Image: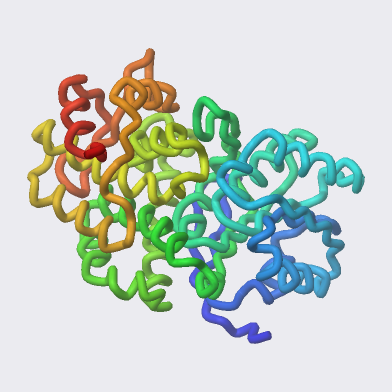
Amino acid sequence: MNHKAQITHLQVELGERSYPIEIGQNILGDSNLLARHVAGKRVAIITNTVVAPLYLEALKTSLEAAGKQVIPIILPDGEQEKNWESLMKVFDVLLAEKCDRQTTLVALGGGVIGDLTGYAAASYMRGVPFIQVPTTLLAQVDSSVGGKTGINHPLGKNMIGAFYQPQCVIADTAALNTLPQQELAAGLAEVIKHGAITSGDFFTWIETNMEKLVAKDPAALAYAIQRSCEIKAEVVRQDEREGGLRAILNFGHTFGHAIEAGLGYGEWLHGEAVGCGMVMAADLSCRMGFMDEASSDRIRKLVKAAGLPVVAPDLGVQRWIELMQVDKKATDGEIQFILLKPLGFPVITTVPQVMLEATLAACVKRDG
């Protein structure tokens, strides 16, 4: 194994809960890198049936080389598995194996595995250490950073969970080589989001480099991951528990979560729903007079160029509104939207129902 892989080091600054993000190619086999963040003797690797055949053995071997005892826990794949039953399966194994507070949990997989493992770590014995090893672009640029953990409930996405920070995030960009194009596109949605909410040239850089990103160009992906992690880490540093500012990271998510819950988890990938949600949020920003149509058009074109849907499913106006009222950002039933005023400058606001209905009419697929 080449231990001289070039690694980009970032730091999420949260006082005593600060931790590093390590980004590099072929770094999963570096036993020193991983073992440095595992204090105890035992490690439980939580992964799924898709990722396990690809990376579990390499990670296990790497940890065993550092003298750690490894317990693999393999769950079924998919957003629909981010539930109470999967959480219980993890606890069943940890208890059967007599895992103690010194056991480190490792999340090896995408956003579902990361969120679920983090919540298991926050809850097991009231808190054990965990490490994020994201293997999808979406997890590398977004969900593995920031300490949001949780599971879905049939009535709402991520409604049960905890803020719980990892010991570190280890993002091996080589894992993206095996990523299906649809999953890659889903990750690009969160990259576009980071560009859209940040003043500066990142959005323009994404527009210029979208073809390279879609083609999995290693240098372009490495930069997109690094910038996304920097942007997210800075927002999380200022507002770890989503008291205000951190909500801007949910641009496109109010609509997106409604799509996921409304269609049934797993029908659309999270990133697909967010991509479409950003197109809808951009449309609403225009209607509110916050942003010009040219900027809204840029967002739509970029989402489409990433291979993401730009037309929303028809859930029915009433259902759309009900689902958005369940969103965690809703206050007293009032839906809070993250809009752009203008591109690069997010605002958190309520909107008149007539404006919202106009956006739904414009963005939703009509039969016939």
Please say which color scheme the image uses: rainbow
Residue drawn 82% across and 43% down? 101
Q: Quadrant of residue 346?
A: top left
Outermost residue toward the front in this view: 368
Q: Quadrant of residue 200?
A: bottom left
Q: Is residue 22 above or below residue 25?
A: above
Residue 366 locus on image (x, y percent): 24, 37
Outermost residue toward the top in this view: 332
Residue drawn 39% across and 60% down? 185
Quarter of the image with the N terminus is bottom right
Residue 300 locus on image (x, y percent): 21, 52
Q: Nearer the viewer, residue 77 or 91?
A: 77
Quarter of the image with the C terminus is top left
Q: Is residue 304 left or right of residue 268?
A: left
Residue 361 locus on image (x, y percent): 19, 32
Q: Nearer the viewer, residue 156 or 40?
A: 156
Q: Is residue 231 above or below residue 285?
A: below
Q: Is residue 197 left or right of residue 13?
A: left
